[in-house]
Amino acid sequence: MFETKVLNLGRRFYRGRVGLTAILNGLKIGTGDEVITQAYTCVAVPEGIMAAGATPVFTDIELGGVNIDAAVLEQRITDATRAIIVQHTFGFPADMTTINRIAESHGIPVIEDCCHTLASRHAGQLVGTFGVGAFYSFEWGKPLACGVGGAAVINDEALAREVDAAMQSLTDAPSSKALRVAIQYLAFNLLYRPANYWRLKDLFGRLSKLKVAEGNYNPIDAAQPSEDFSMRMLTSVSNRLDQKLKSLDAITASATANAQSVARTLQDAGLQPVFANRGDTAVLVRLPVAVSDKPRFLALAREHGVEVAEWYSTPVHPLHGAEQSTVNYEPGSCPVAESACSSMVSLPVINIGGSYLKKLERLLRMQAS
Ligand SMILES: *Cc1c(COP(=O)(O)O)cnc(C)c1O
């Protein structure tokens, strides 16, 4: 029904960001090259750019939205720009018509970040099919949570040959990583419910620090990319992905219905969630909404055990303060993204039911009082 079968998800990597680096390498993008990406993202994206040896250049998002502002994007293009990464944040399709027009006029390839959605459409066309390539992630918190893993979709024959050749030299992850991911996936499957979100998030944070869990964030070292960049997807993750892809249509239908229920609950409480552009279909991983007092909203959600995510809490989540310079983000350079970070929270749309909506309603009443 959703025709996601047009996507060939056969090129699989240890993580999503590894797929991005493979695309950049395949395009021969490296030292001295600039790659534009949006602020209001996570550090995985600049990490992938830097693992290829290139420099991330951040561009701002649309006012009231979560995706690239095409007008600002054009100002960020220089003679050194070699690629533009377009993120479909939370699953909202970016304005690919305008962005592709700008990119084409400068002769710059576009890479789509589809980590938040496999099924959204812009003007009827599936995301992941607009650029030379796209990358996907299958870790916890993504539409198909399989452990730790990523894939690249390639829409250009010459690039596909380059990427396929380079993939020959990927290695298997060490068994210690396989074990950590296996335990993590088991725990996630056993324990995750929206009501447990805060407890699990804290636990995962502690275990990642102790290196017991496979965390989301590697230390950024431009000179020495993480070993993850040389590794293929774990076999266990790959098998799970094959299984889950079979139910993608059902997952999509359920996320779509849930997103409508959550949006209605927010609107009933006088809040305005982000909407897809006219003519687009958004299959979301979470529904973002601006709240008047984000710290208080998050504190209430934690206290009452209601799943509410804070990401993105900083323009290059979770980097704060001076850490941001490690990925070339200059504080103040993307004011709309920074303002979204201080006002936007996001609500789950996968694996939720009526009891979540009731808790959310209660939370919304509390934050209004
Ligand atoms: C999760 C995510 C990534 C990276 O995925 P990994 O599999 O962790 O490398 C990249 N971009 C966005 C927007 C993401 O949410």
Image: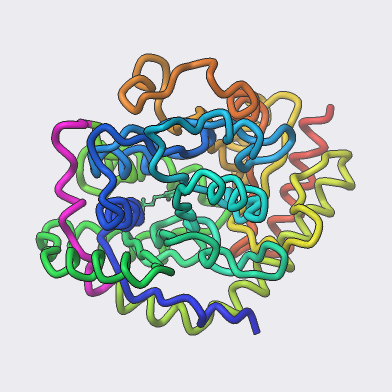
Quadrant hosting residue 159 = bottom left
User: Depth check: 26 or 255 in front?
Assistant: 26
- Asked if residue 301 lies left or right of residue 276, the reply is left
Residue 218 placement: quadrant: top left
Residue 205 location (% of width, % of height): 35, 39
Identify whether 107 is placed above or below 285.
above
Give the colour scheme of this rendering.
Answer: rainbow
Q: Position of residue 93 (x, y in %)?
A: 64, 55
Above or below 44: residue 39: above
**Left or right: where 77 falls relative to 257:** left
Residue drawn at (53%, 31%), measured in percent from left and top? 59
Q: Position of residue 157 (x, y in %)?
A: 35, 72
Taking depth in this image into account, of 61 and 106 the one nearest to the observer is 106
Q: Quadrant of residue 259?
A: bottom right
Residue located at (24% from left, 44% from top) = 52
Residue located at (25% from left, 41% from top)? 30
Total marks shown come to 0
Residue 355, compared with residue 242, is above or below; it is: above
Q: Quadrant of the N terminus?
A: bottom right
Magenta segment, which residues?
221-237
99 part of magenta stretch = no
Q: Is residue 322 left or right of residue 196?
A: left
> 185 or 239, which lies in front?
239
> Where's residue 94, x and y in %?
63, 51
- Which quarter of the rendering shows the C terminus? top right
Residue sitting at x 64%, y 26%: 336
Q: For residue 224: magenta?
A: yes
